[in-house]
Amino acid sequence: MVIWFRRFGEIPGITYESPADVRGRKLPGRDAVPEIHVFELEGKRRETLWWPARGGGGSASPAHERAFGDFGEVTTPALLKNCHEGLELPGEPSDYHFLIQGSANALWARRREEPQFLADMERLCQLDIQLIEAVPGAVQYESGKGTSFYSVAAFSLLINLYEREGSLREALDVAERASRYGQGDDVRDQLVERIAMVESEHHQ
Amino acid sequence: MNEEASFGLRAASLTDPASLIELEATEGKAGMFADIDTLLARVALRALRAETTVVLERGRPTDSVSIVGLDGRLHAILDDEFSVPKQHSRGAWFFPEKVSLKTGLVNLPSIFAKYPRFATGLASDERARVLLTGSDAVLLWAVVQPLFEQLLLPFDLRGHLTGMKSRDDQLVAWASFDEIISALRLGMDDEIAAMRHGGGWNRLGATEQLAAKQRLLAALAREVNDQTVKFYRAYRLLPLIARYYAKAKNGQARRKQVLTRPLEATLSGFFGGDWLRLLRYLGEVPHPEEKIETALPEATLFAADTRIPSATPAAAGSSADDVGVARVQVEERVKTLNAFWTQFDEAHSRQSPGMRSLWGLVAESRGVRIGWNGPDSYTPELYRSLLPSGLVAEIERLWGSTMLMKWPDRIVDEISPHVLMAETFGIALRFWQGVALTAWFVCEGPISRTDIAGLADYFQDDLAELKRIGCPIDSALFEQLRHAETRLGPPEPLREEKSSVEIAAGFGLEISVSMGSRRSGFEGLRDVITQHRRAWSDRYLESYLQSRWEDEIGEAARHHAEAIAEKGKPPTPKQFAKHALFSVNHWFGGNLSALYAAIGQESAAQPVRVAFMPADRLVFAKSVFENLGGRAFDRQSLVSNQDDRRAQAEEQDRQNKLGWLAEESLRFVQLHEALGSIPEMKDFGASGFQHRSASLSPDPQQAWNKYASVVEATLGAVTRAGEPRPTTSMPTAAPYVSPTPPAGTQFAPQPSGDDQPERTSEPRHWLRRFLGR
């Protein structure tokens, strides 16, 4: 079954408070409600969402449209604003995931020039992990080998962020959460070894 | 030895930096370092007191760094002591050309003050790749960076290296840190205790660990003062003094015997690179065999003299004939670049809506493509149909051979002569082609990589370089283009295509796609560009091309002379090849001996010309592709089930890998020419090959054997089928006789009908074009 939410903060299990500058704002697409279309393919019942919009509509939710733009020339405050606004719009969980992930990746790429936004990147990654833990289907797909998960940047970004500061326990916490989604097992093992090495100093 | 032990000899018996500083004071030596001590104190104290001290500017191809917070007097000291020309003039020729500077390390305290939780990571991000040409970079490389690397070692050990080093390695690292804090007399035992190996770091939470790091930084800021910096200088000088006397006989030692790489930095950092100043400090006299080059011989390039070759006086080590031959080689290339420019200019000046784009007129990427050749707006090898055949042939003759850096004794076939020619022409060609194409794609669509307003920004590096060499682009070009842009028509959808596909019985999918937009009025932009291009060309083209070869050949000459100044003997051809690569391949057809002649040096190389690359590279690569088992593969857009999807993806991946191997077969042949034997996998690049080798065999070595045999067999078949036979010969000893027509002669244009709007024969479905099929 296809699920959607009116805003990111309404996803059960998510703790999210909208930033003051977007809270309660009337954003285009905010009141959109999708139609559910049902069809059969290969003998299976399938559902898709159709989001009516001026000029016809399509399968992309308002949140999805915020997730897939060209942000190369956009200032970082505007990029963050786009993300925050997108999280206030209706969408499927995967739309929120890609919106957050794209923004976090961009903030990481800009860290040399704009290190002041690294804390925002950290916060977005933690939000994405919350989302994935609340709705694993956001990053899940079926393959010949069964259920698989897309690679989630939030895990590797946070592990890297903490690991290079020497904050191994924080990095390990993220790696263990990542391993539930089939990613980062080798990194987790390395972090366990490194923590053991630090622990062993005390006994030498 | 002097009757009384020299200052240096007495200093050599010391092990403690403070004792050396004391001895200097009593012996009246301290004044020698007053300026450097002041400068270093200012830089180090500023950095440790959490002020940004080094500013890094990212650039292409290298970054630049500058030390901030210095007053005029300190700037003067910095330039006097550390500028590269002044260090050269004092005999220091040992600088590496490029260095990596950890600017973030010097700024770590200031980064910590602003972003404590992410500071060590941010500091490690801040690294500069710089040419070691500026005085700021030299000071950082020689003095400041080594100090901070050692002083801030705990931040590495408790940062990204946490848990990475064995106990023994950690103890060695901590000993290095202890050594420097002891040498500098820094009392920070309490602050460092928790960070030490076995100090209980594992019991601290993240917040406490962060607080511990901040306490250490605060202690450094508190403890380090002007005297500390003197101790550091003494700490660096003691090994130099010890090494000097370890190598000295009767108090005399030769510079080359004393200076190791780290000690070169010490000489540069504390003696301005001046060996004689070091000897004065030590109270010793130069070794009788010591020879210090304080200036390089002026590079006299052959063509600075405009007389005919036979009248050119032979430079030392090269005959007049050799010099003349080399000069003719440059001259005929310049002539051909001029001929190309004429055609290039004309093609752009007559470009009109409805014609195909001129993307492809200037060759951009080496090699051939088996599969997708780019979007519809790109025409591979467009130059073949737009340039006169004689000019195409001349380009391929002049830039058809090349030298590979590792094998300067061989002249091999260039894979893409037209790319090499474009590289030789350099940034002016890239700029004017780029501007013209931007105007075209802004107007004719479907999309442009930048817009008119963004042109100057997009080409800022090229514009800066053209200005630097004295061939600037008039900024009115951009103003006039912006004005002309206001007269363009409104954007119109270029093509809107609709497709419908039945994806299941009774269930169809209709897709509507708009393919970019166009605007009328291209001719206005074109004429602005043509006017400026011609004005630029009339004024600068001759001097631009002259600066191209003078700069490249002069740069090679400079490296050659520097190597002699540093080592006392010429570099080997392999050592020289790295610095000679551009000049040899751009101006001498890959013949290193011609470069030697051009710079007035006896040739240390007698390269042999080896040639068996098939003339038609694409046909050859396609044959290799087929012989490897490659085939045209049409991946279905819609599949019936997951297994089908996976099978399609796997086959496409296999075909892509075979395509890459076939494309790289040209490099294989080139390596064969260079090596004189069939290349091994390591020559070719094992990682790149092994990434694709499973498409031939699960075992990489077996895959390599198969690949090599297929390429060689294909080569043999092509040769038997009428391609030129392999040749191995010495480069011609006589001056080349250029088949270029006399000045004023025009190349006969090829019948191509390119003045007419292009008519494509069979339009492909948009989805196929999108997918590259």
Image (tube, coloured by chain):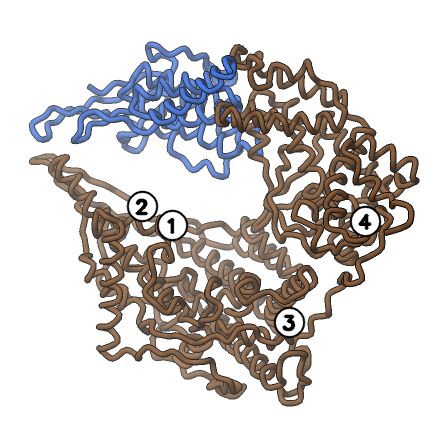
Chain colours: A blue, B brown
Residue bearing mark 4: B278
Query: How many neighbours does mark 3 have within 10 angstroms: few (below 14), some (14-19), or many (20 or more)?
Result: few
Q: Chain of mark 1?
A: B
Residue bearing mark 1: B517
Q: Nearer the viewer, residue B176 or B406?
A: B176
C-beta proximity under 8 Å, tags 1 and 4: no
> Which mark, residue B514?
2
Q: Nearer the viewer, residue B1 or A91?
A: B1
| The C terminus of chain B - image quarter | bottom left
Tell me the CA gap for discs 4 and 2.
73 Å
Q: Chain of mark 2?
A: B
**Dot 3 or dot 4, earlier in sequence:** 4
Three-letter code, disc 1: Ser
Whether B193 is drawn above or below B415: the answer is above
Residue bearing mark 3: B543
Q: Are marks 4 and 2 on the same chain?
A: yes
State the SS at label 2: strand
- Residue B555 at x, y = what percent? 63, 64
Tell me the CA gap for discs 1 and 2.
8 Å
- Position of A77 compared to B758: left or right? right
